[in-house]
Image (cartoon, grey):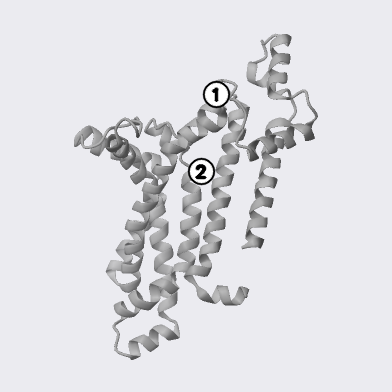
Amino acid sequence: MLRRLIGFAVTLLLAAAVIFLLLDLLPGDPARFILGINASAEAVAALRTQLGLDAPAHERFLGWVWGMLHGDFGVSVTQRAPVAALIAERLAVTLPLTLIAMAISMAVGLPIGILAARRRGKATDTALMVLAQTGVAIPNFWFGMLLTLLFAVTLRWLPPGGFTPWQEDGWAALRGLIMPGLALALPQASILARVMRTALVDVTGQDFIRTARAKGMTLGEAVWRHGVRNAFLPVLTILGLQFAFLIAGTIIVENVFYLPGLGRLIFTAISERDLVLVRGATIVLVLAVTLTMLLVDLAYGLVDPRLRERRA
């Protein structure tokens, strides 16, 4: 665990350095880039002082990192608000959306993968894998538009877009995240189903499955009691990658459904050239991805006790 935590800290530090280099040390003046070429020299100089661009690069980087360690991500140039507060407000949308999409993905993908593995080589297996491949190929934003036509325009069961704050109406907020969650979950459930099927097919050829069947278990019982847990290690890896992808890759879907999430915040910050906000939001995404992978790595020992023994 100590080695993983050290690697986690080093990864964040390297990511912060890369983000700083890309946004602060590229050719050109960031203040001039933000204000435009027609801005006066006095306005550019004032913004450079506000952003701390008049200090040496190493001092600016260390000051940025030190501020983040204390929860200070700077102040948005365009919105005139603390970046940390803006990110926290948008995470209240993006994080529940990610959890909803993950729950749908697991609820759909895992049973399909298990069923396909149990029906290996039969028509059911082929049909399910064709559906899974189709789900991977469908863009989630296009699927989201189809969901809008069905559930919002035709059936009028769900709102077509927008978001009601949780404190105003929790049920309305949840309803506003269902269609985006489904759109995000479709390709992830398809990938999860294929990985689960492959892992279970590999496991069913192992000696302990043959032993369980020799003791009188059917193939389905042996797979369910012994195969699923042994096949879960690669599935756990995919789940970690999917969660990291969802929390960092919701920009398009959030714009399709007009959700005020973190992805849309980054999109707006880029279009408005708010580099302070882009930098802060990007490092938060890096933190979410690296933290997710750290938790997945530590969870390996819980799923497979042999890894704990090997490390010991």
Q: Residue at x 62, y 29 (%)?
A: 74
Q: Residue flagged by tag 2: what amino acid is it?
A: Ala
Quadrant placement of the N terminus? bottom right
Instruction: Where is residue 252? Give x, y as percent.
Output: 45, 36
Q: Residue at x 43, y 37 (%)?
A: 92
Identify whether 241 is placed above or below 97.
below
Camera-side residue: 285 or 268?
285
- Give the structural element (helix, strand or loop) at label 1: loop
Dot 2 and dot 1 residues touching (CB under 8 Å): no
Kindly indicate the quadrant of the structure image that contains residue 202: bottom left
Gap in Å between the C-alphas at discs 2 and 1? 22 Å
Whether residue 138 appears in this view of the structure is: no
Quadrant placement of the C terminus? bottom right
Residue at the disc numbered 1: 81
Q: Find the residue positioned furthest to the front.
A: 70
* Total numbered circles: 2
* Residue 88 shown left or right of residue 22 in the figure: left
Residue at the disc numbered 2: 248
Instruction: Where is residue 209? Give x, y as percent.
Output: 39, 83
* Residue 245 shown left or right of residue 200 in the figure: right
> Which mark identifies residue 16?
none
